[in-house]
Amino acid sequence: MTVGQPDGLGQIVDLGRGVYQMNGTAEAAREIARMTSLHTDGAHLGASVQSQQVIAIVGKEKDFDRPLDRMGLPVERVDIAIPPPKSKVAAAPATPEAKAKAKAWLAKAAELAGGSAAWAAVKAVEVEQQSTLSMQGQQVELKSRSTWVFPDRKVTTQTLPMGEIRQGVDGAAGWRSMMGQVQDDPKALAGVREEWERSLWRLIGHAGEVEAVALAEPVEVGGTKYAAALVQGGVVRDLTLLFDGEGRLAGIGYQGESQQGPARFELVYGDWQAAGPVQYPRSGTVRVDGEVFVQSKITSVKLDPVVAPDAFKKPGS
């Protein structure tokens, strides 16, 4: 589960979501209890509430310790999964003209950033940064270091006031280490692949492969309007490219998961500087549904660093 660039920024947003994200199953169980005035029961079959009239069991049936049919009661299954939210991006006709305009915008942005060939030649990167995470009226200062071998091997270390968190993906599976506890992270592999899809390393390094449609109207982020193009296909929903007046790729927007559920994420880059043959942003601001969530400063960028063979290995494995 990762969110955006510069590379460490994705991990910071993921941290906020991981720590504060609501537990949908537990919320559903509490809502059922409230609506039916039933008491919470401690049965083994997931989160449940019961009375003389009904037993409501919330959870994934495959995770229950015995089949529901063995309860000796009629079973009615109800899907309470939250459907994907509606798109927040205005639809644009995928005309040849709109596609050509988007391709020209991205080609110019790639040229301003050092050229697609220079970006594509980079096979790994190490990024260090300092960030401020704002949430629920509070701010948390943290540092992070990430090593990424493209596209799906990555390890990130985050240092916070309460301790250190490490997250890793070895190309096949993910893990997370926090306060001395190491756990598998089943969603990490898909998350880092999504991060690759919306990363500058793909969007600029493989600009010729990106299919997008120019939007008729500009997109406003933080009081600034940007020319915008909607990327077609892929797994990142509503991935939108933002271009400033000089033609630089100024940021991206997309649909993701916040601590409150589905939300619109917008990441604006700043302070582009040379990193070897490419121009790389040294600052970034992430907004979630229009509110500033993360502000980061990149303190170090190393292209194609030497990476130990076991750098992405799960600790203790």
Image (tube, grey):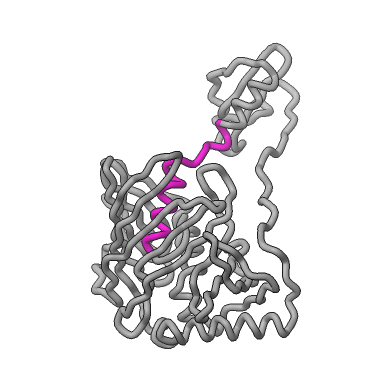
For the magenta stretch, what is the residue range?
Answer: 7-26
Query: Image point 62% across, 73% down: which residue?
Result: 229
SS majority, magenta: helix
Residue 190: x %, y % from top left:
50, 59
Residue 141: x %, y % from top left:
31, 48
Left or right of residue 170: residue 35: right
Question: From what the image shows, is residue 122 above or below residue 174?
Answer: below
Query: Image point 57% across, 71% down: which residue?
Result: 226
Question: From what the image shows, is residue 156 above or below residue 279?
Answer: above
Residue 234: x %, y % from top left:
60, 68
Front residue of this view, candidates 125 and 212: 212
Query: Image point 26% across, 63% down: which residue?
Result: 310
| Image quadrant in which you'd find residue 38 | top right
Q: Is residue 20 magenta?
A: yes
Front residue of this view, candidates 45 and 8: 8
Q: In the orientation shown, which residue stands out farthest toward the front?
A: 223
Question: From what the image shows, is residue 184 above or below residue 279?
Answer: above
Front residue of this view, candidates 76 and 49: 49
